[in-house]
Every structure is written in C-alpha cells, then in structure tokens.
Image (cartoon, rainbow, N blue to C red):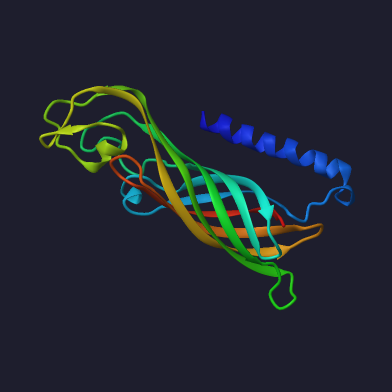
Amino acid sequence: MANKIVVLVGFLGSVWLSPLTAQGYDELDLKNFNYNIGGGFSVPVNPTARNFGVDGNFTTGAGTNFNSHNSIEGDFMWAGLPTAVSLLRPVNGPTGNAFLIALMGDYRLRFDHIRDSRYGVYVLGGGGWYYRHFSVDRNFVVPALTPCQPIFFWWGFACNGGFVDSRTIATHASSAGGVNGGAGFTVRMDDGWSFFAEARYHYAWSQFIPTTLTTVTFGFRFH
C-alpha cells in the first residue's frame, strides 16, 4: 500500500508539472507558484526511537508565494518506520512493518540570496494530519499473562491489569493531528529552480504513544 501511494503521488506531480514545461514559462505567470519534490531519510526520536529505526522518506508539495520572502504550501510526506527491536518483546513473536503518512499545511520564510550569492536559506513550520499504520506478517495471539510494555501499544494491543490482552491482531492504524518545523539550505539554479537540503522535526499526538521523528530531505524547489 505504501509503495502504491508514493508512486501515485510522484506520478501526479509529474503530470501536474508537464503542461507547465510544455507551454513554457513565458506563457504562464508562475512567480506566485511554488513546488517541491524530494527524498531522504527519517530519524525517529524518543519515544518513537525506542522501538523504530532509520528509514527513507518521500515528500512533495505545492503552494503560493505572497512575495519574495513569504510563502504557504501544502505538503505530503511518507516515512518508513522499521522495527529496531523484536516486534513483541519479550515474546518470540512475528515480524512486522510500519509507515507514517502526513498531509501538512506550512508557512515558509525564505531568503533566496545570501549577499547576492546563489545560496539561500529558509525556515518553515505548520501542522496537519498524521496517519500511522502498522501490520504484522500474520494474525498473532499474545500468550496469557504477558507483561505489558510500551511496544505493545505501538502495535495496537491493549493492556489490562498490567498484562496484555490475549487477542488476535494483524494491522493497526492511528490518525492524529501534529505539528512540524524546520529549516533548509538552497542552491539557486536556472528558471526559478533550486536544489535544497532540509531538516524538519515532526510531532503527532498519536494514540497511546506520540509519533516523533526528524526528517532529512534533499530535492528540488521551484520558487
């Protein structure tokens, strides 16, 4: 499912931009339009880092520029969440996988030229919807009297009286609001395009345990 979403978003982004290229910039007023696409890696921080490791991320987005310094944009992000430890400690249980999808609205303050050079910087921040999805490789029943640990909350199990409820689970999803903030560095290219490197922190109020991670992304921005 995750791969299909990434491919679909990338395809739609390409289809969206292709008419602009075909018609030429001279025929369209694009000074108030911005677009970005990139990828990199995501680094969980506690409490997420206790149970998940480093993986890749993909981002894309578009928006409008109010002037040469102030912009707003809508961003899509997919980030992998590989298990860093045994899925169901201390039970010798199945393996699984997880990913995070976010739809965000962000404000960006940018300075495209530092002392008339082609290098620039920007800061951005905002909030949106974060969807955390987990799946295990098969339905799994936790043995009776298994002590409850935080990892069980991540994967959708419930606890009762200090022990995990003995029930079957294959997938679990959690949707929540969240916020993000970060900064980036740009290198100006031709026709309004720039190469960018960006670091951003994300915090979502997900069910049971918050989702917290930092993403490092490299890609291209238009305006």
Q: In the image, residue 16 lies at what x, y percent? A: 73, 38
Q: Nearer the viewer, residue 105 or 185?
A: 105
Q: Nearer the viewer, residue 197 or 77?
A: 77
Determine the residue positioned at 25% across, 31% down. 157
Q: Does 11 sit above or below residue 55?
A: above
Q: Does 93 sit above or below residue 100?
A: above
Count of numbered labels shown in the rendering: 0
Q: In the image, residue 126 lies at what x, y percent? A: 50, 54
**Quadrant location of residue 147?**
top left
Q: Does 210 sit above or below residue 192?
A: above
Determine the residue positioned at 69% across, 67% down. 112
Q: Is residue 159 left or right of residue 197?
A: left
Determine the residue positioned at 35% across, 31% down. 95
Q: Is residue 69 left or right of residue 135?
A: right
**Quadrant location of residue 19?**
top right
Residue found at the far bottom of this picture: 115
Q: Is residue 220 left or right of residue 23?
A: left
Q: Could you tell me which quadrant the C terminus lies in?
A: bottom right
Q: In the image, residue 134 lies at what x, y percent? A: 39, 33
Q: In the image, residue 109 lies at what x, y percent? A: 60, 64
